[in-house]
Amino acid sequence: MINQLERKPPYELIRDALIEEYLGDESRVGEKLPSDRHLAARFGVSVATVSKGISSLVANGHLERRVGAGTFIREIEAQQPAVAIYLGASADSYTTPTLRFYGLLDEMLQTELSRGAGVQHYADMRIPVSQGQPMPALMKDVKAGNITDLIVCRANASDFWWLEKLATRVIGCNVDLGGHLVGIDYAAFARGCSDYLKSVGCRSVGLISAVPHVTTERVPSYGHFFDALNESFERCELKTDERWVVCQEVDDSKVYDARHEYDEELGYRGLKKLWSCKQRPEGLIVHHDAVGLGVAKAAKDLGIDLCKDIKTIFHSNMENEWPELAPYPRMSYSIKEVSSALLSCIGKEGRQVKLVRPQLVVPVS
């Protein structure tokens, strides 16, 4: 007898009872179920209620009705991945110039995924008010089993710790959340910058970067970034000095969504600081698009030629070439390659780390 005290509709109780008794054992695939009348008498409900419960299982592919033969247990085909994209902020914030990369990446991912089974999208408009607090809608869908893979386009690892706890595959872009990781190959970036500066005659080099000079387990790429640069400087015999290194002063593992508001200022202030040194570096590496915009603005205000006075190489992406950075050499990467790397992790078990290699772009003078 079905427990009538439960609050579900009777046909759902029948459906759940059939799932528990008949569908939990793969060895029963192909087996014929008792007739609707027999099940109705067994569970103490009407034949119509049993028929409705069975119809819901037929609709989702668990059972198959064969005219004149009865109802049979079907073999369930492998479930297609249910993919979702999570943005750690309102989608509107990614229309700002310095965060346009994430907006373009988000659009590209949605376009590619919509060609398959579709995609669920979460733009967390609560940020920064509720930073560090799980997004209710996302948590609800994960618990309901509606998401198998979650692509995280932008979320720092400190405030978004809860993403690591989700019972689904998490694919992080430039952030390690314990699952798959896709990021920029900093070793290739460092080699490309050092080789270029050496090729144009530089013997000393400075750095302005949005990455703080810290190492954190949550964002290990920070340590790798500086290790890669130091190794490349040594290989190319490029001299550097702590006075020529300007980095973010905050711990970037706790970045807030307003980051773009001070990255340009960092670039502007950084170039002014380097230019005020009695002894200046001959070359300069500028890491992060937004920082580069600040450096370009400072150069214009101070009358500095970034090709002659201090040979500068920037870091930017190919699809979003800022007019301010177009005249200068850049280590550039493809958003399409980043998107493809993220998509290639869908449905994959274990842990994968995929790095996108930036390429040197030197404008024709």
Image (cartoon, rainbow, N blue to C red):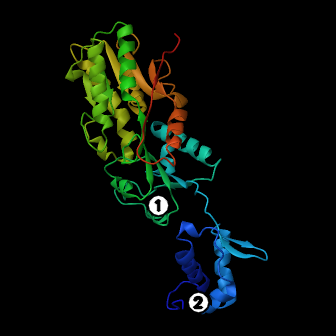
The answer to whether residue 286 is left or right of residue 59 is: left
Camera-side residue: 295 or 311? 311
Q: In this orientation, does residue 196 appear?
A: yes
Q: Which amino acid lies under the numbered mark 2 shown in the image of this protein? A: Phe
Q: In this orientation, does residue 96 appear?
A: no
Camera-side residue: 83 or 107? 83
Q: Circle 1 is placed at which residue position?
A: 138
Q: Is residue 84 above or below residue 106?
A: below
Which residue extends farthest top? 201
Q: Residues within 10 Å of mark 1 (few under 14, many from 20)?
A: many
In this rendering, the count of numbered labels is 2
Residue 160's x, y, as percent? 36, 53
Q: Please name the residue shown 39% across and 60% down the image.
A: 134
Q: Is residue 159 above or below residue 76?
A: above
Q: Circle 2 is placed at which residue position?
A: 43
Residue 332's x, y, as percent? 47, 25
For the residues marked 2 and 1, what is the alpha-carbon distance in whole angstroms? 37 Å
Q: Which amino acid lies under the numbered mark 1 shown in the image of this protein? A: Leu
Quadrant where the N terminus is found in the figure: bottom right
Q: Earlier in the sequence, mark 2 or mark 1?
A: 2
Secondary element at tag 2: helix
The answer to whether residue 158 is left or right of residue 72 is: left
